[in-house]
């Protein structure tokens, strides 16, 4: 597979030139502070970055599948591969540094169309609760319902929002739903998934770590339809959306998905692409690689 083989990097000329968009730098036509900093990184540091990311590739890039989805967290992009190579690519928004998107391997099992969104406890307590306390109409503006843990609807005005107790918030399907029109689901202990979003403006940014851990995908309906077709699942994503009902579509064959974090990536023309270490993962892995081996007696 070309993408995996690219990690061999048997030819490399460090920084013979710099293409800003490849290295997630803003294309502003000037050699600014960030560009100068990137160009002045010592070659020894770049070599260490390559070592770190070759180790990451060893962890994740094994067991080649017929088709798979690859989420490149540090590169803010997603790709879909068939046996003959990458056939689809798009931009993503990933978790903020304090709500990181995890690295994992799993299998996409089903899609949720016209999803509801049950607000995760952290987002409820840290993000939404302060806004509700200031203005209870925030719930109506965001199309949020208040439920108890049995799924029964509650009157928001009956809640003591300074001590709300056992409640949860749920957002109905619609144009303002945080998950958009479709969610791609795969089993994992982190409760993350791939999903649509009404906040399309963030995709125009170069650095896109803005979510609470899940992955927002630009053009996710295209990916959803490819998965349906490649797994012989009889459904048209746009027709199902138009029905307006919340519905799960189970794929006839699960599709592997890899979420991983690479701060170095082989470019299409054999040059290396370096990305900011937004989650600050590189240093700890480098220390582990440099640690002397303990010889057993």
Image: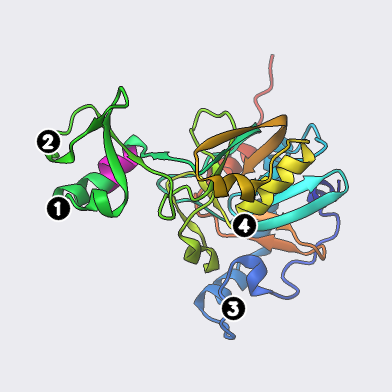
Q: What stretch is highlighted in magenta?
A: 122-127
Residues at marks 2 and 3 touching, judged by CB atoms closer than 8 Å: no
Answer with mark 1 or mark 4, whichever residue precedes in sequence.
1
> Which residue corresponds to the image point at 50% horizontal and 40% vertical from the top-left?
245
Any part of residue 178 in sight: yes
Answer with mark 1 or mark 2, whichever residue precedes in sequence.
1
- Figure disc tally: 4
Residue at mark 4: 219
SS of the residue under disc 4: loop
Answer with mark 3 or mark 1, whichever residue precedes in sequence.
3
User: Viewer-proximal residue, 111 or 189?
Assistant: 111
Q: CA gap, disc 2 to disc 3?
A: 52 Å
- Magenta span: predominant SS is helix
> Which residue corresponds to the image point at 30% horizontal and 22% vertical from the top-left?
150
Residue at mark 3: 27
**How many residues crowd around disc 3 within 10 Å: few (fewer than 14), some, or many (20 or more)?**
few
**How many residues crowd around disc 2 within 10 Å: few (fewer than 14), some, or many (20 or more)?**
few
Any part of residue 59 in sight: no
Residues at marks 1 and 2 touching, judged by CB atoms closer than 8 Å: no
């Amino acid at each position: 597979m070309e993408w995996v083989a690219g990690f061999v990097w048997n030819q490399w000329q460090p920084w013979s030139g710099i293409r800003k968009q490849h290295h997630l730098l803003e294309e502003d036509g000037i050699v600014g502070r960030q560009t100068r900093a990137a160009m002045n990184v010592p070659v020894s540091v770049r070599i260490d970055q390559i070592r770190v990311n070759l180790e990451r590739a060893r962890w994740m890039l094994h067991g080649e599948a017929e088709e798979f989805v690859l989420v490149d967290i540090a590169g803010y992009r997603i790709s879909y591969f068939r046996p003959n190579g990458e056939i689809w690519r798009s931009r993503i928004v990933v978790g903020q540094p304090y709500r990181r998107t995890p690295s994992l391997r799993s299998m996409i099992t089903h899609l949720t169309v016209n999803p509801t969104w049950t607000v995760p406890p952290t987002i409820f307590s840290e993000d939404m609760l302060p806004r509700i306390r200031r203005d209870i109409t925030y719930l109506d503006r965001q199309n949020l319902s208040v439920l108890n843990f049995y799924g029964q609807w509650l009157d928001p005005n009956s809640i003591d929002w300074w001590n709300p107790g056992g409640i949860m918030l749920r957002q109905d399907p619609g144009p303002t739903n945080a998950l958009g029109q479709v969610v791609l689901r795969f089993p994992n202990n982190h409760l993350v998934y791939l999903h649509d979003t009404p906040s399309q403006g963030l995709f125009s940014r170069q650095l896109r770590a803005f979510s609470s851990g899940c992955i927002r995908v630009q053009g996710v309906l295209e990916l959803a339809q490819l998965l349906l077709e490649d797994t012989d699942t009889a459904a048209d994503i746009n027709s199902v959306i138009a029905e307006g009902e919340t519905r799960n579509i189970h794929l006839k064959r699960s599709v592997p998905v890899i979420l991983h974090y690479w701060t170095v990536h082989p470019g299409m023309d054999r040059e290396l692409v370096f990305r900011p270490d937004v989650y600050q993962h590189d240093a700890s892995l480098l220390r582990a690689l440099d640690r002397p081996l303990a010889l057993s007696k």
